[in-house]
Image (cartoon, rainbow, N blue to C red):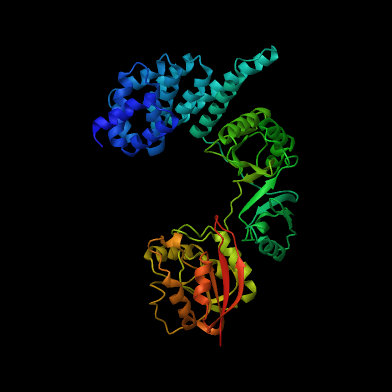
Amino acid sequence: MEQNNYTTLIENLKISEDKQRAEIINKLSKEYNKTIPLLWLKAVSEENPRAILSVIRDIIKKEKPRGIFIRTVGKSKEKLSDLLQHSDAKVRKNACGIIGEIGDSEYLEPLYSAYAAEEQLFVRSSYVLSIGNCGGEADAERLKKILEDLVAKEKSSKEQNSLMKDEKHFNEEKLALTRAIAKLSPPVAHVFKGFANPVPMVLTAMNDQFQVTAQDLKDKSIDAALASDGILIKEKDINKVFSCRTFYELLLPLEHCKNLKFDYKEIAAAIIKSDVVKLLNQCHEGDGTTPFWYRVEFKTMNYSRERADFVKNLSREIDEISKRNLRNSTSSYEIEIRVVEMKHRFSVFIKLFTVKDNRFAYREQKVPASINPVTAAIVIKSIQKWLKPNAKVIDPFCGAGTMLIERAKSKDFGALTGIDIFNSAIIAATQNSKLANVKMNLVNEDILEFSTYEVFDEMITNMPFASRAGANDFDRNLYRNFINRIPQLIKPGCMAFLYTVERNLLQESLRGNSKLQLMDEIKFESGGLTPHLYIIKVNK
């Protein structure tokens, strides 16, 4: 695209409606190395560059061309600083956004000066967030003093029974200060010491496979009950809970926090009423005077909900009514406050990041479409009765080795062999198996070409599928050729366990094969897909 065309697009920004404006910004973003200099030239030449600055901020935020913008500004940094003094408040706000995105400490003093002079309350939090991205530990102390003065001002106002001007923006400024301080001076993390008494816990599990996780818990002598939001247990020993490999997350349900309305004030009040601060202090070391830093996670399938505003308002309210014993931070958090919508009502849970889940610490490497290790553990648990001790096991599409490692952790084995046509998968599986302390023989070869004099007792694999291999590269003949190969690799009377989303293709490939017998089929749900596990016996 010629420079004149870019200039025309930039000029059209002023007269475009929202949809057309978004299309223009998208085009400018794709060629940011050429458009950023033109946009900056336009910004410094216009009397009111509000719209242009907004576009520059959006491009930097989306495409991250910080270096190009910094080089474009060059020695004219004062021109960007001068925009902090512009008569239009939104120009000042957008200039703050740009400075915050590039994170240049040379703008700190102009930011502080403009912040101190700013009378438009809706702009003040923008200065704070920008300082948070540009500053260091000394700025954290400086912002702490500003926050203390702000809180004192609020207290004085309340004592005089007078409302502060525009309380909403005042609270936004306090929240911005809290986040900037946390970013510039990350707090010392709390240390989890355990629960003194059993507490309710909710374990999230795979749909349609709750019974597998329930049985896993029962095997660990943990009583479990199915609930609408997962599996409910009451336990004191968290290490005992993490000995179960077939759940995804451990959450703490809060008392008084079920069936709530979509009202951030009601939800915040319920959270504080649940004595969450007391609970957190009881299970962590310390004297109970250090605040806990948290983030809010809002889970809903109702996309008409105003998520960003809800999270911001809820965070601000929690900070306020917890007397800042709970402090919001989007980067240096220790806990997650999770708000979950079900049937238009809301429940609240706590997730502790101070508790380390090391069940799958071995999985440092993965390849595209690697199976989730929890899903692999569920697959292995669901076929437990079919597994043989001391079996020689092969995974013909081993990927990063997850399925073999989970097989090793489930029952004694004789030997593990992983085959994959991609060398990157073998490299990943090699590293993961070392971290898991599981010995396996890994071979970089096409399973259809794999030559061996050895036959195996078990085959366990996550089969390739179109979206995994890439629709254009997916060979539909692979399934039939591979199915025909199974009797050459597995002993008569022994088992193959094939996990796949290509249900129809696998069934078609099995049809008419007299050497294989389908023993069972188990339906799963994973990542929006509906894979099935086929349990196949090699006929004698």
| Residue 60 falls in image quadrant | top left
Number of dots carrying numbers: 0
Q: Position of residue 440 (x, y in %)?
A: 47, 72
Q: Position of residue 429 (x, y in %)?
A: 45, 65
Q: Is residue 497 above or below residue 194?
A: below
Specify the quadrant that holds the C terminus: bottom right
Does residue 37 appear to the left or right of 103 in the view shown?
A: left
Q: Position of residue 111 (x, y in %)?
A: 43, 21
Does residue 371 appear to the left or right of 249 in the view shown?
A: left
Q: Which residue appears at 48% of the width and 79% of the height?
A: 486
Specify the quadrant that holds the N terminus: top left
In front: 8, or 334?
A: 8
| Residue 22 falls in image quadrant | top left
Q: Is residue 177 visible?
A: yes
In front: 197, or 169?
A: 169
Q: Is residue 302 above or below residue 129?
A: below
Q: Is residue 370 above or below residue 459?
A: above
Q: Is residue 415 visible?
A: no
Q: Which residue appears at 38% of the width and 66% of the height?
A: 422
Which residue appears farthest toward the bottom when viewing the image?
A: 540
In front: 419, or 146?
A: 419
Q: Which residue appears at 39% of the width and 73% of the height?
A: 446
Q: Position of residue 5 (x, y in %)?
A: 27, 32
